[in-house]
Image: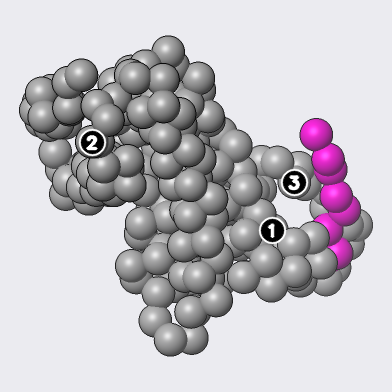
Amino acid sequence: METLTAPAVKGRPREFCVDTALAAALRVFWSKGYEGASLNDLTEAMGITRPSLYAAFGNKEALFRKTLDLYEEEKLCYMSKSLEQPTAREVARHLLRGSMENQTSKSEPHGCLGVISSVACGAEAECIRQEVLERGKVAKRALIERFERAKEEGDLPADADVEGLTSFIYAIMQGMAVQAGAGATRADLERLIDTSMAMWPSK
């Protein structure tokens, strides 16, 4: 755990924990999106001054990228575990349930940070939107490759549309994020998962 010394206007410099500050910034971005999070929101949540933020993390854009790394590491770890499931059906189910667990966590904001930030970004934050979309493409490609392997192994029907199935799963996950942000309950999301899996192609 890294600790930095923040510059102070008066008196002695104040030390702060980088990991704790990043976690606080993540919650702000997650709750408000990139554009909705002001520097005042961020510095207040992180417990540091603007000069300290700039010195430790660079500008707002650089800070967001660091929080996005943290988000992927801590909140999206279920995605890599999903790819290790023995069948394509279980891969899909694990992904949807992992997404649901994130959306229904009582300790975190609801909704998907990537969805919130990519949809809400205006022209001045287009680079952030592109960053989010590019990261999403990497994860989507990994899922396509996993389903292609399942098709080759006979786990999916020979006529299965692998890219279509991947888009279907992503659409459900993104829809769950939006619905959770609008107040959907865990029971609502579980019903959506059950319905989605009932539509999964059988061999």
Element under disc 2:
loop
Q: Nearer the viewer, residue 109 or 95?
A: 95
Q: Which residue is mark 2?
A: 159
Task: Give the magenta-colored segment's residue range.
Answer: 1-8
| Nearest the eye: 84 or 18 | 84
Which quadrant holds the C terminus?
A: top left
Q: Which residue is identified by label 3? A: 18
| Left/right of residue 136 with respect to residue 193 in the rendered view | right
Q: Of 201 and 123, which appears nearest the observer?
A: 201
At horizontal 83% and vertical 71% (from top left) the residue drawn is: 9
Task: Please tell me which of labels 3 and 2 falls first in the chain.
Answer: 3
Q: Which residue is mark 1?
A: 48
The answer to whether residue 34 shows anywhere in this view is yes
Query: Residue 186 appears in which quarter of the rendering?
Result: top left
Task: State the CA–CA distance, disc 2 to disc 1.
Answer: 56 Å
Write the residue at 66% across / 54% down: 66
Indicate which disc, 3 or 1, sits on the residue closer to the N terminus.
3
Q: Amino acid at mark 3?
A: Val
Q: How is the image coloured?
A: one colour
Q: Secondary structure at mark 3?
A: helix
The x, y position of residue 5, in whole percent, is 87, 53
Going by the numbered disc 2, the residue's amino acid type is: Asp
Q: Nearer the viewer, residue 25 or 80?
A: 80
Q: Residue at x 48, y 38 (%)?
A: 145
